[in-house]
Amino acid sequence: PGQQDAGNLPRNNGNAFPSDEWGGISSEEHDEAVMLEAAIFGGIPESRYHFAYAPHQFMRPEGSNTWRSPRPPSPSLAAQRLIREQQDDEYYASLQADREKELKAIEEAEARRLEEEAARKAALEEEQRKEEELRRKVEEEQECERQLAAKEASLPQEPAANEQNAVTLLVRMPDGSRRGRRFLKSDRLQSLYDFIDIGRGVKPGTYRLVRPYPRRAFSDEESSLTLNELGLTSKQEALFL
């Protein structure tokens, strides 16, 4: 514009912008607005403003040949920035501590869950083992009862007291009691084993028959021999387990 146009511009008194584009606010008000905006949105402008924030830097007062020097940010704003940074540091430190506590709680909960699961599994296995043991024991007892019933059924009939070929066998049990019965000399030693077993005083197969005099211990292989073959021919024979 010509010199006459420049003369028509409003005089700049150093406090107001010469253009209505900025609403006629003073440079101090503009600076405060810029600093407040920067503080809200996470930053404080440097000591020298850019054109986008401080266009009044490029406007010279009338009669002056130097640019107007911008003012540094207010000390209170710098203190606010420092406080905000400290608060941010404390917040992130607290957040990190909370995350670590949460992670530790999750790990402890997982460890407890695994421990409880292992305990439940061990308890279940122990219970199954006991049930299996009980079942096996019941089956063994049932099988033993079947065998004893078969032995009792196969036991030869006891001969009469006046039978010439009869032998009375007396057996002393481990508890001191005695069991006796008459057998024929032709009966096998297994019949005496069966007679002892059905009395249920001892477990079958866990003992040996012994004659005290002349001393002789009868083996399982001899159970198929007759009393006559084994020399048990006296009217009465005493044995013990």
Image (cartoon, rainbow, N blue to C red):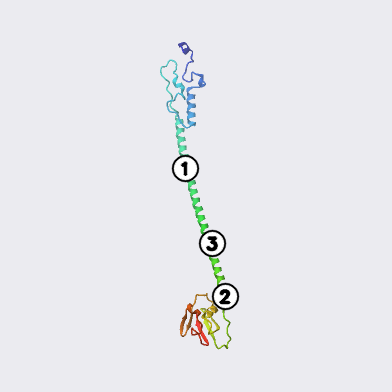
User: Which residue has dot 2 on it?
Assistant: 150
CA–CA distance in space, label 2 to label 1: 80 Å
Q: Nearer the viewer, residue 239 or 173?
A: 239
Point 46% across, 21% down: residue? 56
Residue type, numbered disc 3: Gln
177 versus 43 height, above or below = below
Tag 1, which secondary structure?
Answer: helix
Tag 2, which secondary structure?
Answer: helix
- Spot occupied by residue 26 in the image (x, y as percentages of width and height): 49, 22
- Spot occupied by residue 216 in the image (x, y as percentages of width and height): 46, 82
Please identify, in this view, whether the residue under mark 1 or under mark 3 is nearer the observer: 3
Give the mark nearer the N terminus: 2 vs 1. Answer: 1
CA–CA distance in space, label 1 to label 3: 47 Å
CA–CA distance in space, label 2 to label 3: 33 Å
Tag 3, which secondary structure?
Answer: helix
User: Which residue has dot 3 on it?
Assistant: 128
Residue type, numbered disc 2: Ala
User: Which residue has dot 1 on it?
Assistant: 96
Please identify, in this view, whether the residue under mark 2 or under mark 3 is nearer the observer: 2
- Spot occupied by residue 225 in the image (x, y as percentages of width and height): 50, 81
